[in-house]
Amino acid sequence: MKYCIYVSVLACCLSVSSPASAQSTSNCTPSEEGPTQFCTFVTGQNSSVIATFDCPSLQTPCPDPGAHSIKFTVGNVMTPFSINITPNKVNGDGRCDSGVPGDVFTDPETGQLDAISCRFVRFFGDPAYNNEPPGGPPNLNTKVPFCYPYALNAPGQATCVVYSVFGPKPSSGFYCCGVRKAIAWNNRVDTPDGYMPTPGLFTDPGPNDDHESLSDSNCPAIDLGNDNVFPYESDQPEDDQFVCNIATSFSNKPNTVGTDPTIVGGGVSFNDFVVAFRFCTEKQDDVEGGGHEQGDDGHDGEFEFCQRSKHMEFQEPDTGRKMKGSMDAVTLNGSQAIITGAGTLGDGTPVNYTAVVLGNAPVVGANHFAISWITATGLAFQTSGALIDGYIVVPSLPPL
């Protein structure tokens, strides 16, 4: 049976807004024992429920430190049905010491039980899980996503949350047309070193569901080799792994009630969910980076790029300017890299961009990010600035 840690969701707290066409939104009912909350969807389109956790003030929105919430919006409910949400608090440090999927261990440095890191090994670990038999070479100290510790175990003791959600599958006939997930919290956390600033929303099909049909799953078909496949093969045992990242948007607004960070994800069903920081590569032997820069155009910019996945992304939250593209060519010169490629603006306009990054500096502010692009009609944009937070890695060229 899968080992999970779950957290109650703030009932309608933390400003997770409903779609404009929402038919009904209701709060959930706390259990008399434990943190579980029970939620009921009413018949109709865009039927929503909100569960709020760790909110002793009982205010809505909830201003309490460590408070958090999860909201589900179902596209169409044909028959009323209920779900239960259990928030389990877990610790994780972005490393699975054994490299074995599903292991639970105690961190030797902190003495804390790490109940989350090895749940990422099979589909997100670096080095990749090689499915070696007992006695074979292990993937020791595997790097994995770093769970976002926005909840509190006690004052000053930050912890992550896994929401375990039990409810009917789409194949039950109770509902259809998608399930939107939105998680909100009050405690903003700085991005860990070596991780991307935009976290993901990771999903695990839940206990005894690793073999479920794709029509009932939030994840697509996956085959990474070495039996790292989804749905699992018929003779493959369950091992409690997060399978895919379903995040569609993330807002890292100022840490005040009503404008707290929110992550949203898509899918069709209910299962286990956790927010975690993503990374590019363990070895950092390619050009990669993520963080924020103070642009000379007067706006703060958010960026992330990874040569291994060829992904480049830049946005200015206050202006709404966005660009996503591919890293088509990279030229190295010492600690500087020139990146060029094609991209698309937030409104769908195609562009050609050039980014110049300076990295490897031990002080964050000494690293530098610059980007410019031009559209087919000649409209241009450029900005350049030192890093406020984050990192940039530029590998050294081998000696001649």
Image (cartoon, rainbow, N blue to C red):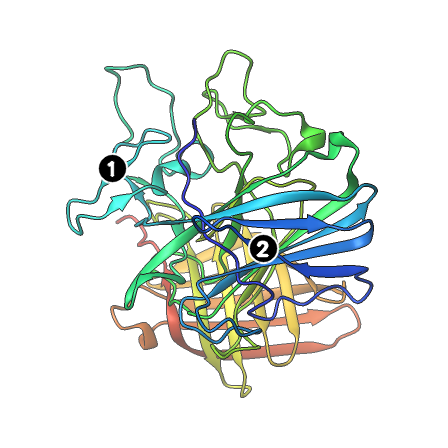
Category of crowding for the residue at label 1, using alpha-carbon neighbours closer than 10 angstroms: few (below 14), some (14–19), many (at least 20): some
Q: Which residue is mark 2?
A: 29
Q: Earlier in the sequence, mark 1 or mark 2?
A: 2
Could you say where residue 163 lies in the image, as x and y percent from the top left? 50, 48
**Identity of the residue drawn at 81% across and 41% down:** 79
User: Mark 1 belongs to which amino acid?
Assistant: Phe
Q: Which mark is residue 336?
A: none
Q: Which residue is mark 1?
A: 105
User: Mark 2 belongs to which amino acid?
Assistant: Thr
The answer to whether residue 357 is above or below residue 72 is below
Which of 243 and 72 lies nearest the eye of the viewer?
A: 72
The reply, left or right, for residue 330 in relation to residue 129 is right
- C-alpha distance separating marks 1 and 2: 34 Å
Q: Would residue 279 be visible to someone looking at this image?
A: no
Quadrant for the N terminus, please: top left
The reply, left or right, for residue 177 in relation to residue 53 is right
Which of 298 and 151 lies nearest the eye of the viewer?
A: 151
The answer to whether residue 262 is above or below residue 165 is below
